[in-house]
Image (tube, rainbow, N blue to C red):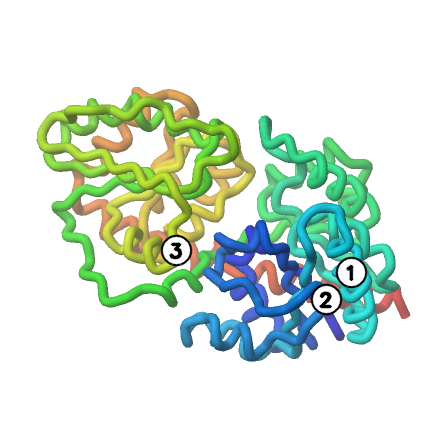
Amino acid sequence: MRIVMHCLPGLLGHIPEEVNCLAKDVELNLVFEVVSNSWPGNMLDLPLPPFDCGFYEGRDFLRRSLPDKAWEYFQKAHGIYFAMYGSGLGKGLFQGIYHTVRGIRKLKPHVLHLDGESLRAALWAPLIKSKLVINVHEPVLHAGSGSFSLTTAKKMLINRADHLVVHSEEARKILVANFSIDDSHISCAPMGPEDVITAWSGKQERQEVGQASVVFFGWLSPRKGIDVMLKAVPEVARMIPGVKFIIAGQPGRGYQLPAEVENLKNAGVLEVIPRHLTNPELANLMAKASVVLLPYREARQSAVVLTAYAFRKPVITSDLPGLREQVWHDKTGLLFREGDSNDLTEKLVYFLSHKELLRQYESNILNMTNTTLNWRRFREVALSAYSRLCVERA
């Protein structure tokens, strides 16, 4: 089977894992969508490819741009291409679409597999005469996201897909509730840990168990519940001497962080890094973390959990349905009542006061990622969909 998988810059963190588990069984061709103004900050830290608008073979570029351990995930891909677009709705957009359609048609895919939706893909995908599979990471946009183009792309693509893959049962429910889709055309395949990020790890010393470090990282926005975290910080610092809190990530458009907490007790520290972290910086941060915090107000699943698990780090998350699917309470992490800073405080103090939990949770995370939260299910779902659709196509 010949598959073209289309990849978006904001979702590249798990693409290496998908390639690694599929390329042994199918002829897998990757197409990376590149727009100059949205490419910086992509999840693989790739530089801007040195190409004009068009469709280009890019294996050598990708090989040169990745650490050796990250490149290993891509070695078995049959083809690697970059679809280059100009920004906005000008000539560069239509040049990119024209050359992308020509390039993909030459590959003659049996199945076009979109990992996420984009307006550009929505414009050219109907011109490719193959079956369509979509990984739907967010069935509907989160409140306040306000992206008209992405909302339009979802409507255009999801309704015409032959098969849809979601990564949590919560996402499946939302997809069915918002689109006229037969549930039999949807598969749920939880994603495994995003282990590729460890390829950027240096020789950092492991954080000592006695050095309490609570890390929040990722895109900063109102739905992430940073205000809930900040309300818990002073009391946790009073109870846990020397605890360090780190908030790291790029603020979303128009988002302002809540006022920082000052003069923490017991030599507590709050550090804010309001920018995108490079992968080496993120790997270093994770190596030193005691626990990763997700005080989210809204989420269907989280790549932050999968990154934490790649480093065998426990998580403390709000008890949203999608996050409950990724966390074994009191085994791989702790759940607290969404929006409840007092409950969050209790969970943080409990975890940081029991140093032996870190080792126990690490062992449970390894068990979880070897059993229920791994890439085998995604492989099974994808290959099953490809086989069925190829039969229908024939």
Residue 330 seen:
no
Residue pictured at 84% horizontal, 62% vertical: 128
Position in image of residue 3 (x %, y %): 73, 69
Residue 150 seen:
yes
SS at badge 1: helix
| Lower position in the chain sequence, tag 1 or tag 3 | 1
Residue pictured at 54% horizontal, 63% vertical: 48
Label 2 to label 1, Cα distance in Å? 6 Å
Circles 2 and 1 in contact, beta carbons < 8 Å:
yes
Residue pictured at 49% horizontal, 35% vertical: 252
Q: Is residue 56 above or below residue 241?
A: below
Left or right: where does residue 82 sit relative to residue 72?
right
Q: Which residue position holds label 2?
A: 54
Position in image of residue 11 (x %, y %): 56, 53
Q: Residue furthest right?
A: 394
In which quadrant of the rendered view does residue 153 lie?
top right
Q: Which residue position holds label 3?
A: 278
Position in image of residue 199 (x %, y %): 38, 67
Disc 2 marks which amino acid?
A: Gly
Left or right: where does residue 101 sit relative to residue 33?
right
| Lower position in the chain sequence, tag 2 or tag 1 | 2
Residue situated in front as seen by the camera: 87 or 390? 87
Label 1 to label 3, Cα distance in Å? 31 Å
Name the mark nearer the viewer: 2 or 3: 2
Q: Which residue position holds label 1?
A: 95
In which quadrant of the rendered view does residue 183 lie?
top right
SS at badge 3: loop
Q: Residues within 10 Å of mark 3 (few under 14, many from 20)?
A: some
Disc 1 marks which amino acid?
A: Gln
Position in image of residue 32 (x %, y %): 63, 63
Please identify the quadrant where the N terminus is shown. bottom right
